[in-house]
Image (cartoon, rainbow, N blue to C red):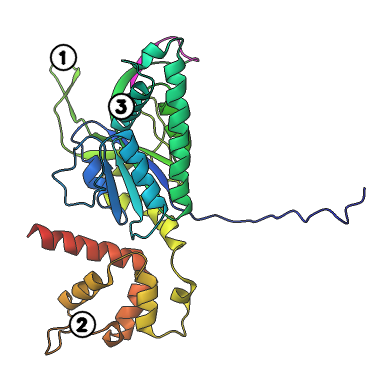
Amino acid sequence: MNTQNQPILAVRRGRITRPQKLVVYGPEGVGKSTLASQMPDPVFIDTEGGTHHLDICRIDTAPNWEGITGAIGQLARGGHSFRTLVIDTADWLEKRLVEHLCAKGNKESIEDFGYGRGWVLLAEEFTRFLVSLDGLVARGMHVVFLAHATVRKFEAPDQAGSYDRFELKLSRQVAPLIKEWADVILFANYVTKTAEKENGKLRGVGGRERMLHATHSAACDAKNRHGLPDRLPFAISSLEPVFGVAQASVVPPAASRADEPVATRIRNTFGPIADLGKISEFLAARGQLRFGEDGVIEGFEHLDPEYAGRMLAEPKRFVSAMQEWMRGKEAA
């Protein structure tokens, strides 16, 4: 066989870093929106008006399908500094799409299209929506769906009986599309503590501890591609393996060059992942930088070289400590 004119097969080995596609679902009030507000530079599309209590950036758009898809288009055109899109919630997003399809088809209900045609249209349009979100991922944004949970009876093919399990509160047409699309699906719930009664049976005694479930089980849908344990503390620090891998790809090559001045290396390393002004404020509070006579904080070039070296060696750990300090300052 003559292979002289055949193109060379392009092969690339190793991990590919890119922004992540997440789903976090759970019961009402468990704290999904608050958790998402701590993700990297988030902006919210609030489909149900449930984030009024949070100090977050929201896209000011009409809570209908046209307004939502228009907002996605604006984000795709760039010109902003957001690194995470949060859609809060997926189940209300599906309701907005059903409303849109019914209005467009002059129908009262999705069932009125007949012979399941409405559900087919729903799945087709939602698939196109997910493709538009992939465009944001390609431009460097994480995309996060928040969703409510529902309990459904599950019939396992290899078992005689059925059992209850937590699933996404979505239609049977849309839920599989999101589950296949996502890199990570996390189920958030309270840990139920039990106590033994006099008759030997267990009874629930409540408990407010929250956990994130990261792997599939008989009790819930979940998955991840980052080797996360089955259960995680309900904290943004638990998701560092998820966002940390993606964030590493946006650090400019100059950040790793030892021949650059320390101040330049700090700006190149931390600029893409944190607010440099807040870092300066944090360093001043720790006594690492001083205020000048004009009230301006010293530049990074005044940092002790040993301290700066520790910052650069573990940037994610440093940013996490800075963010924790900022939250404590805001709460005071």
Q: Which residues are magenta?
A: 157-165
Q: How many angstroms separate mark 1 from mark 3 (CA)?
A: 47 Å
**Quadrant position of residue 107:** top left
Residue 291 percent coordinates (x, y): 15, 84
Q: Residues within 10 Å of mark 1 (few under 14, many from 20)?
A: few
Which amino acid is tagged 3?
A: Lys
Which amino acid is tagged 2?
A: Leu
N-terminal of the pair, mark 1 or mark 3, is 3
Residue 46 percent coordinates (x, y): 25, 40
| Residue that mark 2 sits on | 289
Residue 313 lies, with reference to residue 273, above or below; the image says below
Which amino acid is tagged 1?
A: Asn
Residue 76 lies, with reference to residue 171, above or below; the image says below
**Quadrant position of residue 319:** bottom left
Residue 95 tag number: 3
N-terminal of the pair, mark 3 or mark 2, is 3
**Badge nearest the viewer, 1 or 3:** 3
